[in-house]
Amino acid sequence: MSTRPSADNGRRPVTIPGLLEQKRSGRPIVMVTAYDYPSARAAEAAGVDVVLVGDSGAMTVLGYPSTVAVTVDEMIMLTKAARRGTEIGLLIADLPFGSYEVSDEQAVATAVRFVKEAGADGVKLEGGGPASVSRARAIVGAGVPVIGHVGLTPQTATALGGYRAQGRSVESALAIARGALDLQAAGCFSIVFEAVPSVLTDDLVPLLRIPVIGIGAGPAADGQVLVFHDLLGIRDGAGAKFVRRYADLQDAMNEGVARYAEDVRSRAFPTAEHGYGMDPAELARYQARRGEIATVADDLAQLLR
């Protein structure tokens, strides 16, 4: 697999067997999304277990209206940046829409790129249907660890009726359960449950040998994941029901930039303390020759005519 940076803070790098042990011991797994070096470093400083370079970066970082538009090359760029900031956490990259649906061969080729080019430790794909299960099995067979994802799957939200909770009917709940068990059988080492009723999570977690990471799936999941920009309030609006904000950085950033703009326009910034001077001897020499600047300017003006 990928070559991960060595740790220098006393913590051992997170491993897949370690995550399985966390499930067995009941110690919650912490996952957070990150899309660049600073966000990955913040996750690292907090001791996060799994760093997910989610395709949500399409919206939070790249400004797309949904996750569908992001490309493999863009996701690899984001994953590379997060890799440079992640020494301890297991780094997982989302396979973007259109990069694995066509065939098992396409899925394997895409997954291998994330490992070889971006240094990912594994990949995540959406859906619990037969096609997704087949893709997961093929990728695992090629030696790349896979996380599954059931419930609300943003890449296909339109087909699901929009960004809304899933599994709220008996038929839908049973389909999610079947998909989760099939993904486990295909070799996934973990599964994300997104926006599903808590009772479904309660029932499935004990039946699955692999960790369940919840996002809007209730407290019984083996771990939780939130989007970096959601939990820190780097966005407009309240976000989804399952989000808890731990900071309001968007307001702080807006205020900071507004104060800077005001100071520039009023010439309150920069001041003398923000500038650089010259050694007195060099300053004297410069003052003696500063008239040469006008000569240079005249020469350049002549050249540009």
Image: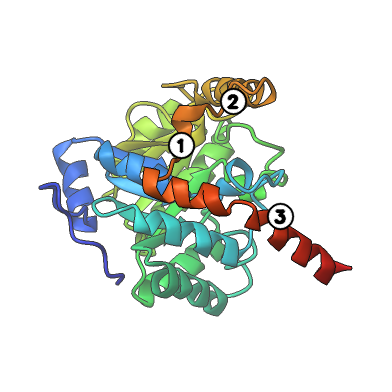
**Which mark is on residue 228?**
1
Q: Tag count in the figure?
A: 3
Q: N-terminal of the two: label 1 or label 3?
A: 1
Q: Which residue sits at x=58%, y=61%?
A: 74
- Circle 3: element type: helix
Amino acid bearing label 3: Ala
Amino acid bearing label 2: Tyr
Image coords of residue 113 (percent x, y): 47, 74
Q: Residues within 10 Å of mark 3 (few under 14, many from 20)?
A: few
Image coords of residue 106 (percent x, y): 56, 76
Q: Is residue 44 left or right of residue 239?
A: left
The residues tagged by marks 1 and 2 sit, at their Cα atoms, a distance apart of 25 Å
| Residue closer to the observer: 142 or 254 | 254
| Residue closer to the observer: 239 or 26 | 239
Residue marked by disc 3: 294
The residues tagged by marks 2 and 3 sit, at their Cα atoms, a distance apart of 33 Å
- Circle 1: element type: helix
Q: Residues within 10 Å of mark 1 (few under 14, many from 20)?
A: many
